[in-house]
Image (cartoon, rainbow, N blue to C red):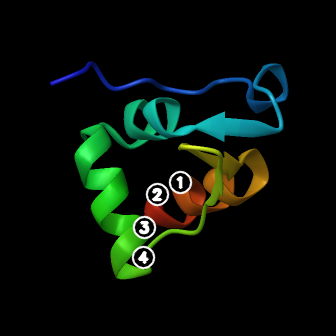
Amino acid sequence: MAKKVIITNWEELPVLLDLHTVALVFNISDITVKQWLYKGLIQGSKIGRKWFFNKDYIQSLTESNNT
């Protein structure tokens, strides 16, 4: 399993995060992120064959998980 990534400066990240980056942020596998997508637990957009996520949305999810 990948190491947990602690984001200290969200401003340095691009506006759109790819699936693997989101998996690192939540300390889960890429497959789990896809399962969350298909279950409607997380929102993303598919562009071509890749999933992308709004940085602000992911940041809000991480902040709500910390409370």
Residue 15 numbered tag: none
Q: CA distance from mark 4 to mark 2?
A: 17 Å
Coordinates of residue 31 in the picture (x, y in percent) = 24, 47
Nearer-the-camera pick, 12 or 18:
18
Q: Residue at x 73, y 45 (%)?
A: 55
Residue 41 numbered tag: 4
Q: Which residue is mark 1?
A: 62
Q: CA distance from mark 3 to mark 1?
A: 16 Å
Q: Which residue is mark 3?
A: 37
Neighbor class of circle 2 (other Cα within 10 Å; few <14, some 14-19, many 20+) is few
Coordinates of residue 54 in the picture (x, y in percent) = 74, 52
7 w.r.t. 35: above or below: above
Q: Secondary structure at mark 2?
A: loop
Residue 66 numbered tag: 2
Q: Tags 1 and 2 in contact by the CB under 8 Å rule?
A: yes
Neighbor class of circle 3 (other Cα within 10 Å; few <14, some 14-19, many 20+) is some
Nearer to us: label 1 or label 2: 1
Between disc 1 and disc 4, whose residue precedes?
Answer: 4
